[in-house]
Amino acid sequence: MKIVTVVGARPQFIKASMVSRILGEAFEETLVHTGQHYDTNMSKIFFDELELPVHRYLLGVGSASHGRQTGEMLIKLEEVMLAEKPHLVLVYGDTNSTLAGALAAAKLHIPVVHVEAGIRSFNREMPEEQNRVLTDHLASHLMCPTRTGITNLKREGIMSGVYQTGDVMLDSVMYYLKKAEKQVDFRRFLQERNLQADGYYLLTVHRAENTQHAGTIRVILDAARELPAPVYFPVHPRTRAFVHDILENPGFRNIIPDEPVGYLEMLMLTRHARKVITDSGGLQKEACFMDVPCVTLRSETEWPETLEGGWNILCGIQKEEIVEKVLQTTVQAENNIKQAFGDGNAAAKIVERLTALPR
């Protein structure tokens, strides 16, 4: 049975690494990388670290407006699917690659498998929300990481082909953290950046609403420089120009900018951070999975389970609010968040579901 898997961005490489490892035992898989993330530190290093199979197709779409990028992916993915004639097309998450893969398959009457189905922020202005809603309504097989995902789909009238499998991101944290502890010379990594374990904040910013204007980045960095410990800041390519100009000011010396790091290094950085400050959907969960408190720089989250017990706190883009919430160091309850995301065997459950489909 043939399956085409479409990936294009860092979080999808991570999820695919867990599923593809098992999928190959029962399916003939063709991996297609759209090129949505093409920077070496955003793409190649992840394929190497995660030991993903070499992609059969690299579409090289690259950066563009949402419409152009999605359209070019759609054209090229249709060509791949016509050539490969798969029985299923597998997509992950909520990127333009996800939507383009689902659209191309649906137009060719190929059943779509959506891993991470049913997730909702209820903010339709987010491109990610548009992508995940449309993909769910195109999919034939919807693999939900949480019970909340099933409830969300039911509200939209989607009840057929829906399964609760757990979250493959939990699988990846449990699997790769052990690998990272053995392979990453983290003491040296910290020494080279004048950091100490459990003595720094980890900051990431990449969402369009937070990166389109220098003023928004400036507010976040103004808050970061008020914090009582170094702030390690791997800079997304989208924000490099803004950030360079701001951080040249001597008043920002406690902020340590860096290039994007690999997944294994990022796991170690998250595990040993005093607190994570981010607008990332995946990093919110990873921090909570590793018992690290998180402040999410958004007014909503697609992962409401992480808010339980105060392990994750939502925060607006105002300097005083960011500082106040980051310095709120206590959580209100024991961390039981992982229970909502499964038992670390989501990939196996997904493949089991697919294997049971009629041939």
Image (tube, grey):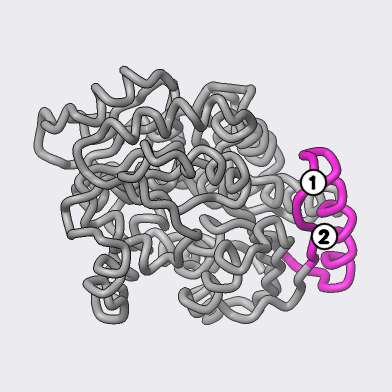
Residue occupying image coordinates x 28% and y 33%? 312
Q: Residues within 10 Å of mark 2 (few under 14, many from 20)?
A: many
Residue 1 appears in the figure: no
Q: Amino acid at mark 1?
A: Ala
Main SS of residues in magenta: helix
The total of numbered circles placed on residues is: 2
Rendered residue at 17%/51% (across/down): 199
Specify which label sits upstream in the sequence, 1 or 2: 1
Towards the viewer: 152 or 120: 120
Residue 68 colored in magenta in the image: yes
Q: Nearer the viewer, residue 82 or 202?
A: 202
- Which residue is under mark 2? 77
Determine the residue located farthest toward the front in the rendered image. 250
Segment tinted magenta in the rendering: 59-87
Tell me the SS state at disc 2.
Answer: helix
Q: Residues within 10 Å of mark 1 (few under 14, many from 20)?
A: few
User: Could you tell me which quadrant the C terminus lies in?
Assistant: bottom right
Q: Is residue 123 above or below residue 73?
A: above
The answer for how far apart the CA atoms under marks 1 and 2 are is 17 Å
Q: Residue 125's image quarter?
A: top right
Residue 73 falls in which quadrant of the image?
bottom right
168 to the left or right of 358: left
Tell me the quadrant of the picture where the N terminus can be found.
bottom right
